[in-house]
Image (spheres, rainbow, N blue to C red):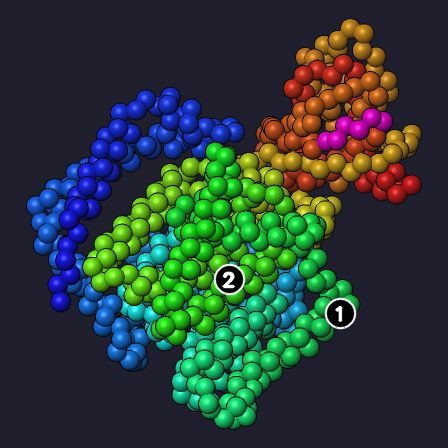
């Protein structure tokens, strides 16, 4: 059958329009784009404006090329395209066989790999992954199952990590293969559900192309492997939907068992997995609703018993999981349920957040970072427009969905997307519009909306008159092409480091490549030489996160937390169990060995490495940040005195015993007698009540025998009037690892109006003063 062709040349006109638009954009002045795009600091606009000429030139060249092809061979292409798409759609009426399902799996793998092949090489561990590795190394199996991360327990997830670590260690390539394979499994399970539901091959292809092109999959496919647990919930939910359909069609027990296994896996993976159990109940209820409409007159009692058996297969794992979590959340010292949820904002706030999250998911399918719309005053309009579009499209397609018995499954997807969004809003409440919804929360409604679009495509295709279907198919292809272009453009912005595009595929790959390079540099500088030099155990000093962050800002977590070296020990060392990390203070996480005699307790091989390796000295000589211990007392007269050398003291400044000396009006220099390092480790400062100093305006330099002079150590200070602030100098590695300290100098960005009181305290004096 040959459909009549539309008279208007849509393809060549659109291509020519894009080409002309590209030429115009390339010719516009840079200042014009800066004035239009700049918001806030304008950092993103600066980077985007520099990319626009190249992007516009590419669009222009591609547009002219496509216009030429459409002008030369447009008619032949239209006929071929219409015939192929129509046959593909009409051929979907044949029963779905296992061979077709395996073909869909192959297609899903090819499409996913075409987007995420780089993640196989450059994906890497991130943030919470290190927590999993630390707990896996340090906790016995019974305690590991109940180990807490925030307010979450991952019983099955902990077992999976232990198995993966036993097989692959911390070789990221294997974890990357699992990450990309998980996305393939998710997309494939969606295709299985759609084809089993009766959606056409063309509608299923729309789901596949829209979902895989979503560029914020980068956060789940290129690292942060803990998110695989949450991604598997979506896969499990879709497979439950497919198994429910197959069970309804065949009444085979294996589908009930499979459903019970999926629900149990989700519930015992994490308490968030209970949404999969709720989705299973929704699938079952909607399937029963659709079945009753199609099967009137059947034995109601027999049907009820049959459906109750499937209901039991879902409920039994739920009850077992409830018993487990009730025990876990009531154990002594255990977690508190939803302790990390944040402040509630009432019913109105919940409705607003739910609406905003739903609309953000819809908009993110076309615009990768939709929260930026609020900067241009377009957020409310975009939200309303997206809801109206989905409601109008559903209303138009509904009669055909009912006619083709797709309505119950369509309603099931809508209910599940509403429920899973509500779960996100209850678990992590926020307030207002314009908040960034992380991809780890957004991918679930995005996946479900792509399923909705597949249903709507079929409803529209069958509802339209036959002569309008070719045009509808072309418009859908153009829409998919626009989505791919938009998502690809966002990924390119992330690749070039444009701010706020870090969670795109290009941005995630870029960040993980930089993180991997930093990790390798630390590993080659410190761990490889030590592991080659010593076969036994090693004791090395900690490097605080604020210290590492001065040279390696790429190691910071997405929420700007700077991890200490011990946090990443499992990735840095080939055998982390050989290393004992020492630090003068106790850390909340990960635990370290506390010692006040750091130089004496580290391994001799480490000190030898410091003496012979300039990169190692530079690593431990990096600037650090000292957090104050604030007390409301001043040291008493038993505090050991310091040797004071006075040079160029400003006129009018009076110096008392044990107070400060000013060097060149910008610094306070303290010279040390020959004390042991652990006896000179605290610096006490009291600012005069008349002094008002800006936050973070004092740095410390240390002049020592081993490191020379290290500078830039920051005093994180509150400068409260009349309060004593005490700093532990042993937290500066270049201070703690020396036998001889020549001097410590305090530097000010501007000279204070009144000289503060500065003393050096012994450990026992500090303990006595703080606990008085």
Residue wearing tag 2: 417
**Side of 687 where 160 appears, left or right:** left
**Which of the 4 image quadrants contains residue 607?**
top right
Q: Which mark is residue 330?
A: 1
Q: Position of residue 376 (x, y in %)?
A: 48, 33
The main secondary structure of the magenta stretch is: loop
Q: Nearer the viewer, mark 2 or mark 1?
A: 2
From this viewpoint, is residue 486 visible? yes
* SS at circle 2: helix
**Side of 583 where 295 appears, left or right:** left
The span shown in magenta is: 717-722
* SS at circle 1: loop
**Quick one: label 2 or label 1, which is nearer the N terminus?**
1
State how far apart marks 2 and 1 are (Cα). 31 Å
Q: Position of residue 466 (x, y in %)?
A: 22, 62
Q: Which mark is residue 438?
A: none
**Side of 143 where 377 appears, left or right:** left
């Amino acid at each position: 059958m040959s459909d009549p062709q539309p008279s208007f040349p849509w393809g060549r006109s659109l291509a020519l329009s894009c080409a002309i638009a590209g030429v115009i954009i390339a010719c516009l002045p840079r200042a014009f784009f800066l004035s239009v795009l700049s918001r806030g600091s304008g950092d993103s606009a600066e980077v985007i404006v520099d990319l626009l000429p190249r992007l516009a030139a590419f669009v222009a060249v591609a547009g002219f090329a496509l216009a030429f092809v459409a002008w030369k061979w447009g008619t032949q292409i239209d006929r071929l395209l219409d015939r192929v798409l129509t046959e593909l759609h009409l051929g979907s009426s044949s029963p779905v066989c296992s061979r077709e399902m395996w073909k869909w799996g192959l297609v899903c793998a090819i499409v996913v790999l075409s987007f995420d092949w780089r993640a196989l090489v450059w994906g890497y561990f991130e943030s919470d992954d290190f927590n999993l590795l630390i707990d896996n190394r340090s906790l016995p199996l019974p305690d590991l199952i109940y180990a807490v991360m925030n307010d979450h327990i991952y019983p099955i997830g902990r077992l999976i990590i232990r198995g993966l670590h036993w097989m692959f260690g911390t070789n990221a390539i294997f974890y990357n293969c699992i990450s990309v394979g998980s996305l393939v499994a998710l997309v494939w399970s969606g295709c299985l559900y759609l084809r089993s539901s009766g959606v056409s091959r063309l509608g299923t292809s729309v789901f596949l192309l829209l979902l895989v092109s979503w560029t914020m999959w980068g956060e789940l496919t290129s690292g942060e492997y803990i998110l695989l647990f949450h991604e598997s919930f979506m896969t499990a939910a879709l497979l439950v939907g497919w198994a429910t359909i197959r069970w309804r069609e065949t009444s085979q027990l294996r589908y009930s068992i499979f459903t019970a296994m999926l629900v149990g896996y989700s519930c015992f993976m994490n308490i968030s997995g209970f949404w999969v159990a709720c989705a299973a109940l929704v699938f079952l209820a909607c399937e029963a609703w659709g079945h009753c409409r199609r099967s009137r007159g059947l034995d109601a009692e027999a049907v009820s018993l049959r459906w109750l058996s499937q209901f039991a297969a879902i409920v039994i794992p739920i009850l077992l999981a409830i018993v487990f979590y009730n025990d876990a959340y009531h154990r002594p010292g255990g977690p508190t349920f939803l302790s990390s949820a944040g402040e509630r904002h009432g019913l109105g706030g919940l409705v607003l957040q739910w609406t905003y999250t739903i609309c953000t998911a819809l908009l993110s399918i076309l615009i990768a970072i939709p929260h930026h719309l609020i900067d241009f005053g377009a957020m409310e309009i975009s939200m309303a427009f997206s809801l109206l579009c989905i409601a109008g499209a559903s209303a138009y397609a509904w009669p055909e969905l009912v006619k083709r018995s797709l309505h119950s499954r369509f309603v099931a997807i809508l209910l599940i997307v509403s429920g899973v969004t509500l779960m996100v809003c209850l678990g992590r409440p926020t307030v207002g519009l314009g908040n960034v919804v992380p991809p780890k929360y957004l991918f679930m409604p995005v996946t479900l909306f792509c399923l909705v679009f597949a249903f709507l495509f079929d409803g529209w295709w069958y509802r339209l008159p036959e002569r309008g279907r070719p045009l509808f198919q072309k418009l859908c292809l153009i829409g998919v092409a626009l989505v791919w272009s938009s998502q690809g453009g966002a990924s390119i912005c992330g690749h070039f480091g444009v701010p706020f595009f870090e969670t795109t595929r290009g941005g995630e790959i870029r960040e993980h490549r930089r993180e991997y390079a930093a990790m390798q540099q630390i590993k080659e500088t410190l761990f490889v030489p030590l592991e080659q030099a010593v076969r036994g155990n090693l004791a090395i000093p900690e490097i605080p996160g604020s210290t590492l962050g001065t040279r390696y800002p790429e190691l910071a977590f997405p929420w700007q937390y700077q991890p200490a070296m011990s946090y990443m020990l499992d990735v840095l060392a080939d055998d982390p169990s050989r290393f004992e990390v020492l630090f003068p203070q106790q850390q909340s996480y990960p635990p370290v060995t506390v010692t006040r005699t750091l130089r004496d307790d580290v391994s001799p091989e480490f000190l030898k490495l410091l003496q012979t390796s300039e990169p190692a000295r530079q690593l431990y000589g990096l600037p650090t940040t000292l957090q104050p211990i604030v007390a409301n007392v001043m040291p008493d007269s038993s505090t050991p005195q310091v040797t004071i050398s006075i040079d160029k003291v400003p006129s009018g400044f009076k110096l008392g015993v044990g107070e400060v000396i000013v060097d060149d009006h910008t610094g306070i220099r303290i010279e040390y007698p020959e004390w042991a390092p652990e006896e000179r480790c605290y610096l006490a400062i009291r600012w005069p009540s008349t002094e008002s100093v800006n936050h973070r305006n004092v740095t410390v330099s240390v002049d020592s025998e081993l490191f020379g002079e290290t500078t830039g150590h920051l005093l994180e200070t509150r400068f409260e009037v009349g309060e004593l602030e005490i700093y532990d100098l042993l937290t500066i590695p270049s201070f703690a690892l020396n036998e001889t300290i020549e001097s410590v100098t305090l530097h000010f960005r501007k000279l204070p109006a009144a000289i503060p009181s500065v003393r050096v305290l012994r450990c026992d004096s500090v303990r006595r003063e703080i606990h008085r």
